[in-house]
Image (spheres, rainbow, N blue to C red):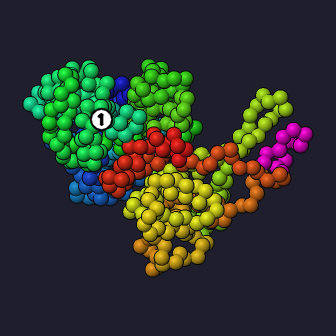
Amino acid sequence: MIAELYTARSLADTLQAVVDGVLVGLGFGVAAVNLVRPDGDLTVAAFAGDPEIETRITGRVGSRAAWERQLALGENWDGVRFVPHSAESPAGVPCWISKGATPDHPDGWHPDDRLYASMHVAGTGGELIGVISLDRPGDGRAPDTGSRSDVRKYAYHAAIAISNARLRANMQRALERLSREQQALRDSEQSFRQAFEYSPSGMAISEMGGEMHGRMLRTNDSLCRLIGRPASVLRRYSFLDLIHPEDLPILLGTSAEGGRAELRLGRRDGSYVWVSLRNSYAPVYALSDAESGTIVIAPGDARGTVLVPEGGGGYCCGLDWGDGPNMACEACGLPVASRIDDCSLWQAVWLVPNAVRCLPVDNADSADNARLSWTEVLVGAKATPPIEPITRWGSLVGLDHWWSWSPQWEATAGRALAHLLAASGGRPVTVPDGLIADVFQRTLDALLPAAQPARRAVLAGPGLSVPEMDADVILVPIHPQTGEPWSLTGPAASAYPVPLSFGVWMWMAFPELDLRLPASGTMPAGVIRDDPPAPRPHHLFRADPGTFEQTLVRLPAVRIPWLREILENLTNHRRTGLF
């Protein structure tokens, strides 16, 4: 009986299997499933036992408030609710009138008695899924202790089966929507391809930025005929290679977005032809590795899942998402997540948005989980050191230590640097001397002009004095619980806030003088020494380029030409050691 609940594929089949199971397995003569709708009310979604009643009651809706009053009238029988015939049922709850005689023994079942079993997410105590209505027990008597236990267990499994069916339905709808979107994308690409290929005007798609700046990625037939060169040959050229030398300044001075110019292109026979050039800029950045709404957790936090062997393709030395979700629900087999565990990738589990949902946590509002004030965070948090020891094994002298810049600092600096550039308005930016200057000032000086008046960035946050009114930018911490940046009130509230991870900010605001080095060699295991002082890393600090790019492309200011130029030249900036 329970197995049949989990074999039904559609939601409708599952609901019908639930009521059929009540009749066959539990021995009742009539059963209905009242399913919770998105608006909270309950509708009679499945019925079994009496075709005449089924015709009248299926599809009827009862309000959530009326159902709560109805269940409150019942006696709690080991997790199920028994409402005796003497109780007056509230209006608004779909019900039926059973035919039968009044029982002549105390534990007999009255035709107007009702038995209800609530179904909740994860069995009991979670979100209400629906209510099973049971009537006409086969022996004509009220259920005994054993029968009540069977009803409670059955409702538990029915809740799981209905939840799985809903997830399957959501996944099916998501797959159908994805299929429609992919088809629409293919149709759009086909329309663009036809408009591009058959356009009477010469058209080309060129790479912007990087080592191959200006190289033609694609050309249409009209351009090939115009300059007398086949498309296979043009793909080896840059636009700069085809422009008349005297027109190069014109091309370089033409805006990449909507710019127009008249210049000469070189033909295959050595002659030049005058053309009217019009530019259109379309940046292409991968903002994320997953669709919107994806939740990422640590692999160790995943429970009740199994790996899908067929989803292990496309990787280098481990697991990735190359073949789609590679983790499934252990109970129902539904694909629910992608496990990432490959070389050069962070270990993570990406949950499929349409396959999972958040559930309330027990004691979420308790004192232990309450949102800490900034003062409490400042007292209990730990600062993140800017450099950390790296240990090498296999050295001739045993363990060998050296120091490297912290990846957390590099990522935080990459994000902050994007905000600093956006806040600069194209003017120079100065930051406080010392470690903060080591992190930001060199890159800011290289990317921003030096001739204009500088904008001033200062450190601000809990435990620090209020910044002066002439501060244009403030470096503030992010709350470790909520992710919200610290906000400033008062005259300097108009300053642009640049977010920093709390551990990095705390070290900038309250630095520790000496970093401790893990002991090795002849010193006892576990001993930490602070002498000699930790040396500096072998290279200057460099912000993480990936974090910088991913942050900047999300800021509205990226549309400004000079910021877009920084993105286009990011590869060259990495070569020069800025990132």
Whole-percent x, y for residue 353 in the image: 38, 40
Q: Indicate yes or no whether the magenta region holds residue 197.
A: no
* Whether residue 136 is situated above or below residue 190 in the rendered picture: below
Q: Which residues are magenta?
A: 517-529
Q: Main secondary structure of the magenta part?
A: loop
* Whether residue 85 is situated above or below residue 280 in the rendered picture: below
Q: Nearer the viewer, residue 116 or 214?
A: 214
Report the side of 227 relative to 245 (left or right): left
At 37% from the left and 57% from the top, the residue drawn is: 72
Report the side of 288 relative to 503 (left or right): left
Q: Is residue 115 visible to the viewer in this orientation of the structure?
A: no
Report the side of 323 relative to 412 (left or right): left
Dot 1: within a 10 Å radius of its alpha carbon, few (fewer than 14), some, or many (20 or more) residues? some
Whole-percent x, y for residue 389 in the image: 72, 44
Q: Nearer the viewer, residue 328 or 519?
A: 519
Q: Quadrant of residue 16?
A: top left
Image quarter in which the N terminus is found:
top left
At 50% from the left and 32% from the top, the residue drawn is: 340
Q: Nearer the viewer, residue 352 or 328?
A: 352
Whole-percent x, y for residue 71 in the image: 35, 54
Residue, disc 1: 240
Report the side of 274 relative to 145 (left or right): left
Q: Is residue 437 visible to the viewer in this orientation of the structure?
A: yes
In the rendered structure, which amino acid carries the disc numbered 1?
Answer: Leu
Q: Indicate yes or no whether the magenta region holds residue 525.
A: yes
Q: Nearer the viewer, residue 145 or 31?
A: 31
Q: Residue furthest left?
A: 200
Whole-percent x, y for residue 255 in the image: 26, 48
At 19% from the left and 36% from the top, the residue drawn is: 264
User: Secondary structure under badge 1?
Assistant: helix
At 40% from the left and 24% from the top, the residue drawn is: 323
* Whether residue 282 is situated above or below residue 561 in the rendered picture: above
